[in-house]
Image: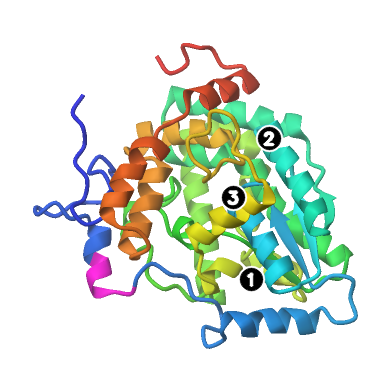
Amino acid sequence: MSVPKRCNRCILPNSCDLIPFDSDGTCKLCKAALTENPPAQQTADPQMSLNDHIERIRQKGKGRKYDCVVGVSGGRDSTYLLSLLVKRHQLRCLAVYYRTPFTSKTIDTNIRRIVRQLGVDFEEIQLSQEYHRKIARKMVLLWKKKAHRLIINLACGPCKLLNREMYRIAHRHKVPTILYGTNIYEAVQIAPGISKKQAVVRGGAQVSSVTRKIKSMFSLMSSGAQLLVEFPGLIRYLWLGVKSSVLYISPHTFYLGLRYPGIKTFNYFYDGRWDEEDCQTTLNELGWERPPGCNTSWKADCSFSEIKNKMLHQTIGITYADAFFSNMVRAGAMSRQEALQRIETEGKISEQRLREVQDILELDDRFWD
């Protein structure tokens, strides 16, 4: 098998069938970045500084028990965010957590200890882990029969329900703001559920609007209908598909905005700079540990990411690490040389973690044969 060549500006491999390459070896995303703004997603009010946003959150929280609800997975970025909000901004946070079937004991121990260390109130989302495991197994087996990009997304369908749960918890506690620690370089990466056209234009500045949300909703419904034609057996999972791919696919869906009009969301690292060095320093100070066998701190909170990487690579010729590091290079947050060096270790799938997931899903050792 030949080793794919990588873009001469970022490190995107030319094996990715979503992104075309020019004859000079440059991917279309880098070509677009030469004439457009770096990857970013603007908030509804781009004129406000991060401190302005934080102060507005603080003012809205006056007279309430909490200033904000913060989603924490026990992973790198959400743990970093929680520390910033408590130590740097002195916000009164309610940390909300869901232990998935693929959350390691190390990660679970990390977050439970760290919220106590930070003096933060903690609430755990109660969703059926067995249902989550069952759906993930069903979709992985379905993908095995026919490798389709959208099946990879459906395997994580139960996790999308967390967006609904976050709103419910904020509503119950009368908290007006939900904060997320989504990494900006992760947010604009290539995803298995998007088309070639979307992949090429993705990464430019996007201002959320009602019109855009409605168009996105209908686009997702259309993709779902096409998937049902191809996989009629998915009809039994239709309601989960609607919830995970339309109603709750992100915290910013049209439905959630209508259902909970008094609650606003804020992505901290869209306005505040995500500093990898400071992130790692913070994690070290908190005593955050990486799970055994994990090759990178990114996505360390979910061992299912290993099997998703495997499926994604076999389906569209790229891993999440390829896309993540390429986005950072394209945005000037990392040199191409550093990305090439790090991809050699951090971009490799952990066989230990892959076996752990296969055991959880009760998959045969010859599954990948």
Q: Position of residue 77 (x, y in %)?
A: 59, 55
Amino acid under disc 1: Phe
Q: Position of residue 253 (x, y in %)?
A: 62, 64
Q: Quadrant of residue 167?
A: bottom right
Range of residues picked out in magenta: 32-37
Circle 3 — which element?
helix
Residue picked out by circle 1: 266
Residue picked out by circle 3: 76
Q: Quadrant of residue 240?
A: top right
Circle 2 — which element?
helix
Which colouring convention does the figure follow?
rainbow
Pointer 2: residues within 10 angstroms few (<14), some, or many (20+)? some
Residue picked out by circle 2: 106
Q: Alpha carbon of mark 3 to alpha carbon of mark 2: how far?
A: 13 Å
Camera-nearest label, 2 or 1: 2
| Badge 2 or badge 1: first in the primary sequence | 2
Q: Which residue is depicted at the point 47% across and 23% down?
A: 351
| Badge 1 or badge 3: first in the primary sequence | 3
Pointer 3: residues within 10 angstroms few (<14), some, or many (20+)? many
| Image quadrant in which the N terminus is located | top left
Circle 1 — which element?
strand
